[in-house]
Image (spheres, rainbow, N blue to C red):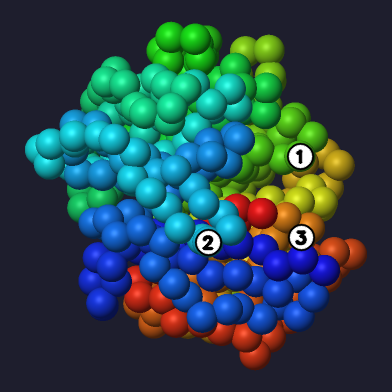
Amino acid sequence: MPSHLIFLGTYTKNGSRGIYAVRLDGATGALSPPTIAAETPNPAWITLSPDKKFLYAIHASQAQAVGFSVDATRAQLSPLPATPSPAAQPPAHLAVDASGRTLIAANYREGYVASMPIGADGSLGAPTAIKHTGQGPNPTRQDKSYVHSVTLSPDNRFAVVCDLGLDKIFTYALDPATAQLTPANPPWVATAPGAGPRHFKFGVDGKHAYALNEINNTVAAYDYDATRGALTPRQTLPTLPADFKGETTSAEVRVHPNGKFLYSSNRGHDSLAVFAIATTGLLTPVEIVPSGGKVPRNFAFSPDGTWLVCAHQDSNNLTVFRVDASTGRLTRTAHTANVPAAVCMLFYD
């Protein structure tokens, strides 16, 4: 079986120097020693263009992001020409649309979503920002808008934006030709008060979707109307054991490539939660297992769904699980690698 190239975004701490690369053995799940793919400050979220020629990382500037050309054979990233001035707060999340012509950034600290055109050479144009205003019921975490993530719909017509501070999930219509976003109708759906929506994923059927709520540690299932980009709440389940009383926050949510299971991570409880997805889109809990490190901020599946690799922010390690495609259950392997402050994981192939 082939190996898989993984790029890892990190915080610049604990000795981290930027974006790292490791290879996963598709047959055994073993990880190669990590290498530096590119030196860049605080690349805490990274994303690829659809043709995989370019990788983008968040950046503390008005530009919101910096781009790199990808040399997959050497696992190296070369900076694209850019002159981002370090003036603004960095976004928390990035996504490239399916046409490869628009990059969208979710700016957590400054409370806006920004879209920018991508040139044929991968270069980024000036961003256009849409500011969110308001607050939520949690005075510590929701004193204003905190735009946390952006997710493109399967048909590339809409961008779904989670605002942790406002307890709202916004939908914007996307025009890839102009890199412009406009509010959909309806423009948003409210979550439970104090939920704090963080990340969002669509089911493989395109008819259902799931939001991970960071503050109240739940995952919510929605019906999705692709004609309008509208979300209808259906179900909310906890991502934690009923008897857990400690401090923890949910981090990442992903749907298995076969579409039958959903997974989320818990920081503090340091675990991975597994749910079965019914044909109706509703969820049933399967298991909650230790993630194998401290603060599992991000994880991802190999393209064939055989392996789940989890990145831990505070223990600086990657763990590897074999996935049972019929039950969704996870089996921890002995394979690991050390990557400082790893907080974003991206399978290249």
Question: Residue 69 is drawn in which quadrant?
Answer: top left
Question: Residue 306 is drawn in which quadrant?
Answer: bottom right
The correct choice, above or below, for 67 with respect to 307 in the image is: above
The correct choice, above or below, for 269 with respect to 79 in the image is: below
**What residue sits right under mark 2 in the picture?**
74
Q: Which numbered dot is residue 305?
A: 3
Q: Secondary structure at mark 2?
A: loop
In the image, taking residue 54 as reference, residue 39 lies left or right, namely: left
**Crowdedness of circle 3 by 10 Å Cα count: few (<14), some, many (20+)?**
some
**What residue sits right under mark 1 in the picture?**
204
Q: Which numbered dot is residue 92?
A: none
Label 1 close to label 2 by CB (< 8 Å): no
Look at 20% across and 44% down and name the residue there. Answer: 60
Which x, y percent locates residue 329? 77, 72
Q: Amino acid at mark 3?
A: Gly
Which x, y percent locates residue 187? 46, 16
Total numbered circles: 3
Label 2 close to label 3 by CB (< 8 Å): no
Look at 23% across and 71% down and name the residue there. Answer: 13
Residue 133 visible in the displayed image: yes
**Crowdedness of circle 1 by 10 Å Cα count: few (<14), some, many (20+)?**
some
Alpha-carbon span between mark 3 and mark 1? 13 Å
The correct choice, above or below, for 171 with respect to 161 in the image is: above
Classify the position of the C terminus by image quarter. bottom right
